[in-house]
Image: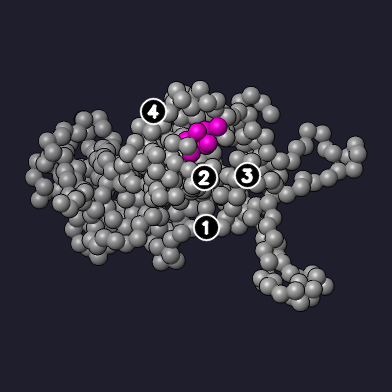
Amino acid sequence: MTKEIAIKVENVSKTFRIPHEKISTLRGAFVNAFHSNGYEEFKALDDVSFEVKKGEFFGIIGRNGSGKSTLLKILAGIYQPDTPVKYAKGSRPKGEFHGVKINGRISPFLELGIGFNPELSGRDNIYLNATVLGLTHKQIDEKFDDIVEFSELRRFIDQKVKNYSSGMQVRLAFSVAIHANRDILLMDEVLAVGDVNFQSKCLEEFNKYRDFGKTVVLVTHDIATVQRYCDRAMLLRDGKIEMMGKSEDVGNKYIFQNMSDEEKRHINESAKKNKNIKNHKEKTAIEKNVEITKVDFLDRSGNVKNVFQTGDDISVRVYFKKNKKTENINIGIGLYKDDNSYIFGYNTQMDEYSIPPNAEYIDLSFDSIPLLKGNYFLNCICFGKIEEKYYDFVEKAKKFQVFSVNEKNRYRGAIDVKHYWN
């Protein structure tokens, strides 16, 4: 394994034996001994191979039961993979390897409670957990105050962990894992248990890890986090790798998998109808001084998308072609839900923005757009000094969808406005 590789996984499988029934009597044990079907085998991982580079943020996503947590536990050394393929002496292909190789010290942050003794205090568990991670007593003494401060558990540090809430346990475990300062951080989706403020705090630590060239392997259902922080991602399905590549592409694949058939149909139709608005406007384009030729939605990285999550950064890019003599043009958009209810609208004249004379497109950007789950579309207009006298107007110029893996349909309407009760 080269020095540039932090984790190498090659041909790894993991099989569990699941009993068919509980044997509670001596007779049952005797009878079962003569049957071969006392259990069935469940293959949690099936011939999985991948590499994670040093300094890379690598996401692992997939539905429940896809093998994500099993894989992370194998990386952490909690589970052992199935026995690798055995070759006759001298017959192993040159360079072939089966198993897991780790190049660096690991700090695992896995299931709630792993590495903790519930009968011990938070203080004692810090020393216990950090010792398991390889820190000396002196090193723990030096880091102790920082660990407690980050966890925000100073008042409760001498209480038994069994009396902690799940969120408090997450705070303590994550704080120890971060301050252990290992080369590789393995994270399961226990962060979902913490409160929003602490989650934000943890995500800030991710940025620091990146700055120091640390490696992070993240298992989560939060696709927005994967797409924002991970360089690459892997999608597992039934224990096999279904897709691996850029986190943006893999995340979109997973989102599409979780859509209903109706939602998938809507996305596919939108893609066909909105490839290029110019296609259905060529007959009238000659009569116009300005023509809107295309509308795209872009994510924060500048990639064209039609599916977003609540809270994503979104830019609307409007392409246009104008007569050289035409000056002082304005562009406007109106956002509607698919039931034709109006959400909001903006134009360059309203915002006192002058489009550069040689521009061929213009962007309207939104930070952390608060749209709730649903289907939306844009109307787009190009006009001069007076909006009523327009050069071009395109109804339903572009459709898009807002989706959230974690959303539980708590809110109604179209916008999630930040609010609080007191």
Q: What's the CA distance linking mark 1 and mark 4?
A: 37 Å
Looking at marks 2 and 1 on the same chain, the residue that comes earlier in the sequence is marked by 1
x and y, in percent, of residue 379 in the image = 23, 53
Farthest-out residue, right: 89
Q: Residue at x 54, y 42 (%)?
A: 115
- Kindly identify which residue carries mark 3: 78
The relative height of residue 105 versus residue 26 in the rendered view (above or below) is above
Q: Which mark is residue 64?
A: 1
The residue at which mark 2 appears reads as 117
- The reply to whether dot 4 and dot 3 touch (C-beta < 8 Å) is no
**Which x, y percent locates residue 99?**
71, 41
- Tag in front: 4 or 3: 4
Per the image, the residue denoted by label 4 is 145
Percent position of residue 243, x then y:
57, 48
The three-letter amino acid code for the residue at tag 1 is: Asn
Label 3, label 2: how far apart the Cα atoms are:
17 Å
Camera-nearest residue between 370 and 382: 370
Q: Nearer the viewer, mark 3 or mark 2?
A: 2
What amino acid is labelled 2 in the image? Answer: Asn
Residue 108 relative to residue 348: left or right:
right
The magenta-colored residue range is: 125-131
Of residue 329 and residue 240, the one placed in the foreground of this image is 240
User: Residue at 40% of width from left, 58% of height from top?
Assistant: 267
Residue at disc 1, secondary structure:
loop
Question: What whole-number distance in Å separates the C-alpha atoms at marks 2 and 1?
Answer: 27 Å
* For the residues bearing labels 2 and 1, Cβ distance under 8 angstroms: no
Structural distance between the alpha carbons of marks 4 and 3: 29 Å
Q: Earlier in the sequence, mark 3 or mark 1?
A: 1
- Seen in the picture, residue 188 relative to 327 is either above or below; the reply is below
